[in-house]
Image (cartoon, rainbow, N blue to C red):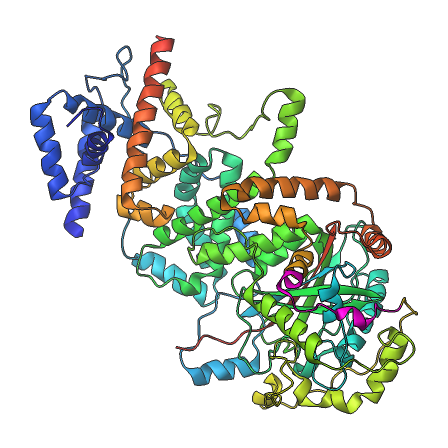
Amino acid sequence: MQALRAERSMQLIFLQCVATPQPPLSELGKHRKIPELRSFRSRPTDTTVSTDDQALIDRCLAGDGEAFGALVDRYQDRLYGTLVHLMGSAHDALDVAQDAFVLAYQNLGSFRGDSAFYSWLFRIAYNASVSFRRRKKQSMSSIEQVREKTGSDPVDQNRSSDPTQSVETTELQRLVTQAVDDLPDDYRTVLILKEMEGLRYDEIAQVVGCPIGTVRSRIHRARSELRDKLSRTLESES
Amino acid sequence: MNTNDPSIEELLSASLDDELSADQQQVVEQYLREKPSAQETIDAYRELSVLVQSIPRSQAPDKLSIAVMERVTLVANPPTIESKSPRRAWKWWSTSLLATAAAAMAMVWFSRPPQDATELAMSTDHSNRPNPMDMDSWYEVDHMAMTDRDIGETPGSAIPEGARIGSISKSVRKTARADRPAMPSAPSIASFSADKLDLNHRVAPLAGEVFGYLEKQGDEIVVVELMVVSVEKTASEMIVLLRQLGVQDIDVPRSGQTEDLVAVYVEADERQLANMLDQLTHQVAIVDAEPYRAPRTQPPAAVKKVIDMKVASAMTSPKRPSTGTNAFDGKNARRMQQADAPAIAQPERKGSLVKPADNTKPSRPPQPALADRAGRTPKAPRTAAKPLPDSQPLPSPSESAAEGSASSRSRAWLARIGLPREELKRMKDPKQSERNKAKLLSKERSAHHENQSAVRGSQDKQDNLTSRSSTPEKTRRVLFVIQPQPAKEN
């Protein structure tokens, strides 16, 4: 397992190297030079809880609420950053992240430490996001009413693709972000879990609750659709 | 192999992620040798991968940690650690650490007149045998209706200490207050009996179990559904969700503060409460990492069992001698309760609701009350009640004809959840369940939208009483009873 993780780390470094001025942009960027990009990809998931995390968890279980605050500070950016793209809305991501942290706190006693705390937290967050989406679907009728009245969808001011968000984005990143956000939920989910969370296929299958073959298929379809979408966008803008 | 074959495309994509088996790797390598241009596909996927990874990650806003910590502080206790030995577990149970592990029961009244003969049969009273609908049940129902008005008039007032729950004899306290003026008056909070839930012969109710029984409010036969929800993991969520419903000032005792059961009565819009319950139950599923399952549209086995037993009971039990007046109204309830006082104290009556109603067999040996098993002296059951005003007589028990048929049991269930039969049939279809749920929700929402006034609940109930329509109820009343839950044994 250690060797596998090292392999994956090396692969990641390699990808970063080839990313910079890599020719053929294939169908993607024939008329555009990809700027130097820094990968924001999370490190591959650890399989065991770190001693720091475990110490904080032990303190939490002993009744030290501040220790949980430290865990929140440690993982909130990573979790929230992924959830924004997973949910497609900063506002929704905020709600789901809150739910996930609170649920994690309430169930720290059941955390057995056989996986990394973040992996456990993320699984909770993912399930919370599924629940959130389901609840949101139930209230879609109000949105449909708005659409009927105005002829357009309600504007989500917290849309993650909003370029005025706190993170500075390049034009290409904005296009990619938009394209990812526009993917169907199933495709976007597995792609984000793969590319942003660095999960393996079997881990994605476990989180999402589908066979590995489905994960492989969805990732491929997500990439294919993303490639087509970006190609069309770049060609139209050039 | 054809380039357009999705399988090879998938393999090319997976090769980028090092997710190929040895055989698959050979297939890809062979394919690349035969068609070197396929390497461009891999390169494109690789660039896409880098691009997606380069998407900036938003930093969490400050309000996230603040909000999380605020909600965390609502958790009364730190996460619990399960007892490791049965002895410790039993000790833990006996000391009733309320806040460290709890179960919430949601008591849902569907204030609705009897719909069919089955329910009339189920409402038949039989005095000579332990029966779910025996006198003390009616008495308690009457008292519930009485308490309804009391609580409704003084929201937030505490339940009198005299209110006891069956042989567990825990006092019930009302600790929630609905700030919203639109909250309808509360029907009751008092004395649903733990005996009814058959809790005395078992360690604890299990989360997800549903207990149902019939009770009488005024001259209405209402179906009471008690859903056991483990709030060991969701206690604070319940508080938060209640706040979202406008229910404030939840005062859940902390560990060691009390050994009492604590009842939190809530009455609000049915849809909101249904969503809240859904969230509560689903959050348990979230933590347990269980996949989402659509809400059950079939009657839970526990409920069906109760209904079946009630029907069987109605078929086999002798009728209660007529008193010439409504034997179940509040005035007579107290009188008859006094007359039946010794019977009320008999342990054979305990747990009668979910015991098999078989007259040919002796009653199940009385199980010691939880309090007894814990070594404490059970407190005396509540015996005082205010009389209710006279109400209309119940339908004749003779209407229990044709009781027990499958169709009538089915109608009883359909009526219990208050849905038209056609609606439920559509919901049972998994392919259409989501769409129908949305339709139903929309339908309910439109119905709820018209009923946001303060007197909504009681007025609707009265309307249903007079018209005996099958319109789904618009107000759902929920009673959370937080009670100690035993630790799991290894």
In the picture, residue B57 is in which quadrant?
top left
Q: What residue appears at the point 65 percent right and 82 percent down from the top-left corner?
A: B168
Q: Is residue B142 above or below residue B183?
A: below
Q: Left or right: A45 with respect to B258? A: left
Residue A27 percent coordinates (x, y): 26, 16
Q: Left or right: A228 with respect to A164? A: left
Q: What residue appears at the point 41 percent right and 64 percent down from the top-left corner?
A: A110
Q: What residue appears at the point 8 percent right and 24 percent down from the top-left corner?
A: B34
Q: Left or right: B453 with respect to B346? A: right
Q: Is residue A98 above or below residue B38?
A: below
Q: Is residue B172 visible?
A: yes
Which segment is the magenta one? B393-409
Residue B63 percent coordinates (x, y): 54, 42
Q: What residue appears at the point 29 percent right and 44 percent down from the top-left corner?
A: A199
Q: Is residue B331 above or below residue B212?
A: below
Residue A32 percent coordinates (x, y): 29, 13
Q: Is residue B251 visible?
A: no
B316 or A92: which is nearer to us? B316
Q: Is residue B398 magenta?
A: yes
